[in-house]
Amino acid sequence: MNRTLLRVAIFIIILGSVVFLIPNKFVTPVVPSTSDSEQPQVNISSNGARLLSPSPTLQESASDELQILVRRAGDALPRRGQAQGEGDQDSHHAPQSVMMAAERIGQLVEHIELHPGRKPQAVEFFVECAGADQVLASVRALCYHELETIARDTGLSLDEDRFSRIPSSIRELSDALGE
Amino acid sequence: MLFSRLDGARVPIILLASLVSSAANSSIFFATDIPEEQRRLMEADLETLTRVSLDRSDEKLKDLFRIPEISNDALQEWLESRVKYVVAKDFYVWDHLYKSPTEVIYPPIKLGVPLVKYLPPIPNTSTRSIMAMMKNVGGGIYSSGRSVNHAYLVSIPGLEKKVSVVSPRVGIVQVGEGLFAVRPKTSSLPVGSVVFSYYRMGILFHEARHSDGNGESLLFSHSSCPPGHDYEGHFACDFNLNGPYTIGAQFFKNLLTACRDCSKIEKSVLKVLVLDAASRIIRVAPRFTLEDSMKLTSRRKHVFSCYQKEELDQKHGPLKDGLCTEAALESSRSEIREIYKKGLANLLIPAPLVARVLDPAPEMLVAKEK
């Protein structure tokens, strides 16, 4: 028993020495690099406050992630007739395709909450979704609801022309969440 | 027995006792042929109902349920007065029915707003079996008894006495496979996410409403969804303002408002459950002129016979006449849609029907005096 403990202790000592001898270049520095491209951008607002914005790299990765999430949400939108095609499911309650679409939309909402700067891009998706005739009404109304939330947060007017293709039936259905 | 052999046996025995008592908090009886796993899941859902956060300021839910206040106890009581027995998916009703020796009188049939039927129901084809979520079989038994003017008794596995079906409130619901498969296989949410439990509870509350009603509102039967609806032709819509879909929508909405621990994704799923149920509430139904009504009947017959033919084709090979080609069917369907649109136009007489709140009080039969 004691011999085993001794062997373990020796092994740890050797391992520690090896790690110590590894050249610094293989170890990621904890302190951020001073090069311009990697430094977070500091914007000075008109009132002189320092606004820290994410680095371009972070912005790019957020944008990539948004695109992935938009694509996944778009792929998950259940088409009309598809609900009836889910022939083995009980048509009395929300089919799984509707649940999955809501999940993907939820992931998108979660993302834009973390990256509010990406909201304009998400608006495009929600307009497309809410205006898509071939998509199930419940999911379209969910998209319209999220659009309304963004509009409320950002001061966007939903009376603009580009929103006119969203029919009143979908707008009214989304009221079920607000009534 | 198992625990008594272990050291410190008192702890597990106390734990076991608390589990048994929590399951016993609900008065709903589970038939003994329900698989253990399914029973446990439903008991856990009912347990969730006793402690879930509710939006107590929800006046709509209060009015809809006709309860004095929104509380977990009040919701549980509402549910348990409408759902009393849960039977397994393989429970074949006719094998468990007995005619009661007592002669009975059913309340007279009141003619009210007719069931709105836009299209014939889409039949289940022989090759596909529907994964039903849940059915209120008690209401169906009451309604059957009503049509032949005698009362039924039902034997439920595990229950010594037969249950007497004297009202739609007998509260026998049958579970289906679908109820235990509400979580999509590709879902990113954990199996134990509250939304799946809420979804199953919503279905239970939906079925509970089918235990209500009298005359025109008896069982709060569904209407067929109108042309152009996502579930066109399915009996999966309500033409009233307090039926099972309104119950479901308001129930989910309450949970959505109250769920502070829900993630954005879970909230999104709850939102779509509200919207799916709300989308099935039909607020205006068309009325037709005599001519349109006759045309509608003929087109519906055409579509229906073709649905039947499709079913027969699968068994006996395709029919050779051109009656049921996709083009012929689409022609009838589009005529139905046109007549429907016309029937909704407010300028016509008679004016379209508007959905309203129906009387939820359950009717009850009485024994005939000798």
Image (cartoon, coloured by chain):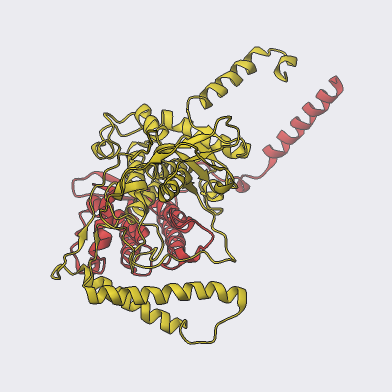
Q: In the rendering, at what x and y percent does residue B98 appear?
A: 54, 41
Which chain is rendered yellow in the image? B
Q: Which of A168/B299 is in front?
A: B299
Q: Which of B95/A140 is in front?
A: B95
Place residue B9 in its image quadrant: top right
Q: Is residue B316 above or below residue A174?
A: below
Tell me the residue at 25%/72% (across/down). B341
Q: Is residue B285 left or right of residue A38?
A: left
Residue A94 is at least partly visible in this image: yes
Q: In the rendering, at what x and y percent does residue B212 appear?
A: 35, 42
Quarter holding the N terminus of chain A? top right
Tell me the residue at 51%/57% (across/down). A89
Q: Is residue B352 left or right of residue B61?
A: left
Residue B243 is at least partly visible in this image: no
Q: In the rendering, at what x and y percent does residue B357 appear?
A: 24, 47
Tell me the residue at 47%/28% (across/down). B26
Q: How many marks?
A: 0
The residue positioned farthest toward the front in the image shown: B370
Tell me the residue at 46%/32% (across/down). B48
Q: In the rendering, at what x and y percent does residue B347 appear?
A: 13, 70
| Chain A rendering hue | red
Q: Is residue B126 above or below residue B271?
A: below
